[in-house]
Amino acid sequence: MGLRTFVIRRLLLLVPILIGVSLLIFAVIQVLSPMERAAVYMTSEKDAKNVDAIIKKYGLDQPVYVQYFIWIQQVLQGNLGWSIKQHRPVLTVIIERAPATLELAIFTVPIIILSGIYLGVKSAVHRDKFLDHITRITSIIGWSLPSFWLGILLLAIFFAALGLFPPERLSYELQVHVFSPYSGWVRYTGLYTIDGLLNGRSDITLDALKHLVLPVASLTIQIIALIVRVMRSSMLEALGKGYIVAARAKGLDKNEVINKHARRNALIPVVTLTGMLAAGLLNGVVITEYVFHIPGLGQFAAVSALPPPDLPAILGFALFNGVLFVLANLIVDVAYAYIDPRIRLG
């Protein structure tokens, strides 16, 4: 089976999986009363005054299967309900906040993956030597640090004491420019590092990069530790395989054996881990976004869950979250097939 056929099959399998995700979320909605479920279908504050009309319009007094088909039609049309706390449609809030989280993930994920794999390989190759001990100790310390404590510590040192890297996404004077309707600023992507370049404002790009340093460092210090430990363990297992011993016995170059043969096979468990971690970052890192005052998806989900809960926002975020993890699994499966052809041939 070729890689293209493998990808097509995985794409077809997404359909029943996504239906299953929607059924689970819809089942959660069913524990609510029709009055509470009506909030999921509201698109404006005006709708809140016509709850009875909403119930009748969307068949909330109809059999469950009828309600499901009506609800899924609304979801496919982009109606995820009205956020009670944000006073806007849920989809609008998600679209508005997603760039902040996406920008954080774009700069964090490559650092974590490349550095984690590199350090994990080096640690395994130099097993029980000084480099291995240092890497393992650092990994344990990094993974053990509470995220809120690490974030506050970084802010205390690099912002409060040294005044180098501030929180939030932009400096106040640049925020005024970006949000002013008279400044001529065009929001192409919502990512300040990219929009700054597209608007010809390199100062905004540089300022956005400066504000990303601490949150990216905070996430990297913690998550890279897990990647290093998994990569080291997987690499040690690969180095002990018979084909690696045979390759060494044939006199192949050491670097070729490590990088071409052992590392490629050791990547499979790491690909799974990084795929899930990347999806988690794209869904928002609640504590990091709170500590560094980043208005992303994690902060939105946390505020929505505070009592009284914003049910439409929570359900909309849950659906977004489910779809994102399903897509992440697809990417992981494709990466498997590329790394190890035996997977798509099996």
Image (cartoon, rainbow, N blue to C red):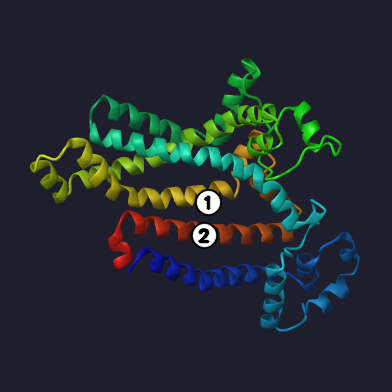
Q: Are marks 2 and 1 in contact (CB under 8 Å)?
A: yes
Q: Residue at x 61, y 15 (%)?
A: 162
> Which label belongs to residue 172?
none
Percent x, y for residue 118?
A: 35, 36
Q: Which residue is mark 2?
A: 327
Q: Label 2's element?
A: helix
Identified by mark 1, the residue type is: Ala
Q: Residue at x 76, y 69 (%)?
A: 37
The residue most toward the bottom is: 63
Identified by mark 2, the residue type is: Leu
Q: Label 1's element?
A: helix
Task: Give the camera-side residue of 39 and 179.
Answer: 179
Q: Is residue 308 above or below residue 232?
A: below
Quadrant containing the C terminus in the rendered view: bottom left
Few, some or many residues within 10 Å of mark 2 (<14, 14–19, 20+)? some
Q: Which residue is mark 1?
A: 279
Q: Residue at x 37, y 48 (%)?
A: 270
Residue 73 visible somewhere in the drawing: yes
**256 lies left or right of 203:** left
Percent x, y for residue 244?
A: 16, 46
Q: Residue at x 14, y 40 (%)?
A: 252
Q: Is residue 25 above or below residue 235?
A: below
